Amino acid sequence: MTKKLVIRGNHKLSGEVTVEGAKNSTVALIPAAILASEPVVLDGVPAIRDVDSLIEILNEMNVKTYFENSRLIIDPTEMESVPMPHGKINSLRASYYFMGALLSKFGEGVVGLPGGCDLGPRPIEQHIKGFEALGAEIANVQGAMHIKTPQEGLVGTTVYFDVVSVGATINVMLGAVKAKGRTILENVAREPEIIDVATLLNNMGAKIRGAGTNTIRIDGVDTLHGTNHTVIPDRIEAGTYLSIAAANGKDILVKNVIVEHIESLIAKFKEMGIPMEIGEDSIRIFQPTAPLKGVTIKAVPYPGFSTDLQQPITPLLLTAQSQSTINDTIYPKRINHIPELQRMNADIRVEGDLILINGGRQLQGAQVRATDLRAGACLVNAALMAEGTTEIYGVENILRGYSHIVEKLTALGADIEMVYLEEDEE
């Protein structure tokens, strides 16, 4: 049964909120764990829909799992290589990490082409380029990728990525951990989630150096063993709640934050004039006492401003006195939230590759749809600011990446509820 969020806005929020483990790490750590010959324990796993989907995929491959209180135990000792179910794959972009994992573990696999949020083209050519460089044979058969290792196995090599890609960096890293000799990956992504995956693999016995820099070196090993690992905090969830706090808060403490992971966001907050107190692993946001200034945001690869935060921060920019602009160089088509914000009386438009945002208008409640995960976070933030009631449809997209969002916002004083829909309401 589908759901909608009903938010009665224009209440100032206060209190504290704790950030969960990183979604973008977890969806790669789970496929990485199947490379072990023993159980792997992941702590800090968020209770989100993407995790549920990955667990279902593991269970279909005869991997035993146990998930409770943010601890996920993955036991791949009796795992079987089977073609991956299309339904789960098509709803979950990160399922493509099973390509690298199955290649390493079994030397073969069949993986349906990935889905996820519709943000424009996200080709997997760089993944395939990396696998083929290691010696894998890949064929696209009726929309599924058939990957196979030659008889002599994968052999380490140098791979230069034509574009910086988080997905390709992690996937080829998974494919290379058991390849013979040394693999050098150049022009790789530097996101904290990549370091997190490399840390897990190294704790399992892999030999990976350079994660977090432009070049990763991997010396292949024969086997990987079980381990315990704690997922890093979710910098995108942290940035979302910080944006909500700055747009609609009196005094909100956001806990379990690695501050250096969101320095680009904090820099924009400072430019805008948002008062805050930065702790060792927390950030406290106070209600601004002076009008906020508009800013220019350019979404670029890490450590620059994250594409995943350009939508959640947009409602905050609508509170500034002067114009703001957003240029998303990663996903220029990430603009599905714009018409929804316009329904809520926002003065916002797209010109070429720029999103132009003019503040000063009071947002009004409306019926809107979350077409993707971060657009949903944007609309939640906007609804909290708006006068009247907002109904957000497409809630399943929000639940893909935000754990306990209703409970967390209710604890801050938001008037928010989840309503189950009859079929004719969807």
Image (cartoon, rainbow, N blue to C red):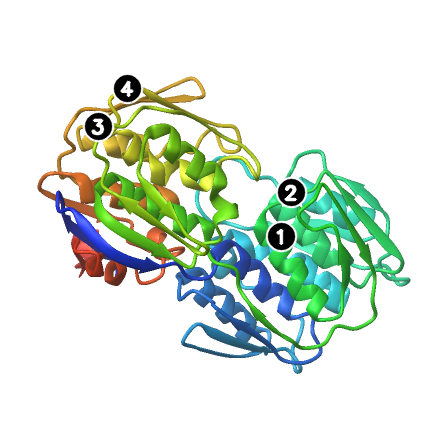
CA distance separating discs 1 and 2: 8 Å
Q: Residues at badges 1 and 2 in contact (C-beta under 8 Å)?
A: yes
Residue at x-position 83% and y-position 62%: 220
CA distance separating discs 3 and 2: 35 Å
* Local secondary structure at mark 1: helix
Local crowd at mark 1 within 10 Å, few (<14), some, or many (≥20)? many
Q: Which residue is mark 1?
A: 194
Q: Which residue is mark 3?
A: 346
Q: Which residue is mark 2?
A: 189
Q: Residues at badges 2 and 4 in contact (C-beta under 8 Å)?
A: no
* Local secondary structure at mark 4: loop
What residue type is disc 4 on?
Answer: Ser
Q: Residues at badges 4 and 1 in contact (C-beta under 8 Å)?
A: no
What residue type is disc 1 on?
Answer: Ile
CA distance separating discs 4 and 1: 37 Å
Q: N-terminal of the two: label 1 or label 2?
A: 2
CA distance separating discs 3 and 4: 14 Å
